[in-house]
Image (cartoon, rainbow, N blue to C red):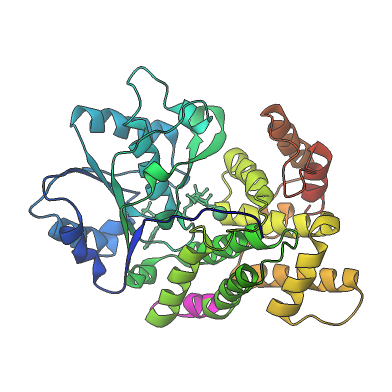
Amino acid sequence: MNNFEFHNPVKIVFGEGSIAKISELIPKNAKIMMLYGGGSIKNNGVYDQVIQALDTFSYIEFGGIEPNPKYETMMEALHIARKENIDYLLAVGGGSVIDGTKFLSAALCIDENEDPWEILQGKIEVKNGVPLSCILTLPATGTEMNPNSVISRKSTQEKLSFGSPFVMPKFSILDPKTVASLPERQIANGIGDAFIHVMEQYLTVPKNTPLQDRWAEGVLKTLIEEGPKVIENKNDYEAAANFMWSATMALNGILSRGCVEDWSTHVIGHELTALYNIDHARTLSIILPGNMNVRRNVKGDKIAQYGERVWGITEGSKDERIDATIAKTVAFFKALGLETRLSDCNLEEDTCKLVADRLEQRGVINFGEKGDINHGVITAILKDRL
Ligand code: NZQ
Ligand code: ZN
């Protein structure tokens, strides 16, 4: 096992009716900006619950944060938050609203003459953040309990991320009742994204981490068992609760402590979203099977372990078991309604080189758990999924 440090200070308040508790958790004298997305919270009762709980607080609202939150939109929020001397941020929504709020939290703490985009380029080190908290309405990203944020810039078609302990939420409210209003497409996205978060931390090279492996396999099996129940019936509270907690556990840092990670499926996937606006999870369900197939020389031992323990695949040579495991994974994604090939999104061969070129131009090369993913490997992974 590798050496590690672990500190996750995010308070989780889980369960039906927990939104009202924000009135006890936010400091009374806070000057709050409440941030939300395109309006789903106004149709499912979440907005009303928040407004009621904020009754005695001083707050302003900032709505309209879009899926794959845009830098341009968050710059508008930054302008208003500076003008209004905001000192507390409350994100109400899915991963996009929360990520946008994390970026705002960091941007509010840099000099006004500095360029906030440089936070995402890694040129400005985040040294502080305005306190923020979340009410999560879409189980998927794990952002409610991690330090990461992913922001897209419309003008340059870039999708970049940063991470800082200073933007970890003070608390996150997880009410599984919010799942009931999600469109089926977003439920499938959430199951797929959470599943592949586990894979990026687990499906690498063996490092004698039996406890972490079994935690990871536990989250995967729970998503396989509970996910379809949520798709079948969004009002199944117990299934929604298990889905929601699985998605948080999938990316709150616990699973990967001491392990070797590989976020290459995400790195390549972000390019597909930036270029073609494909939903985040759907880029991953296309790329992961190609990553498993093309890089079986690196991931083979863990793929075989995953195949046996999660899908019960024990027969045949190692390569046959790997093939069967990839087939099971693809079938699971398809059953959720996720795309698994570039052609499912009407993309053709020119995409493969274009994505590899863009990553290479940005200096994103020699990544993955063995540092072996270069222009040729990226192209091969994508060609595998034509
Ligand atoms: O904008 P509104 O109207 O709220 O509608 C949203 C949006 O259209 C809707 N929605 C959310 N909760 C709902 C609901 N509709 C009905 N009922 C509800 N309860 O769902 C749509 C998608 O929302 P979005 O927040 O974009 O989805 P998600 O949570 O999947 O977030 C995706 C973003 O997170 C990033 C992705 O790259 C993408 O930008 N990620 C963030 C990570 C992190 N910070 O750790 C890790 C992930 O790998 C991922 O990269
Ligand atoms: Zn993801």
Q: Position of residue 43 (x, y in %)?
A: 28, 61
The one nearer the camera, 108 or 358, is 108
Q: Position of residue 169 (x, y in %)?
A: 34, 51
Taking the image in four quarters, ligand 1 sits in the one at: bottom left
**Is residue 2 found left or right of 115 in the rendered image?**
right
Magenta region's main secondary structure? helix
Please state the extent of the stretch shown in magenta in the rendering.
227-235
Image location (x, y in percent) of residue 374: 79, 39
Horizontal placement of 182 versus 31: left or right?
Answer: right
Q: Residue shown at 24%/64% (left/top)? A: 19
- For the N terminus, the image quarter is bottom right
124 with respect to 270 (left or right): left
Q: Tell me residue 4's x, y (percent).
A: 57, 54
Instruction: Decide if residue 91 is in sight here.
Output: no
Vertical relation: 158 (above or below) 175: above
Does residue 296 appear in this view? yes
Numbered marks: total: 0
Residue 322 lies in magenta, yes or no? Answer: no
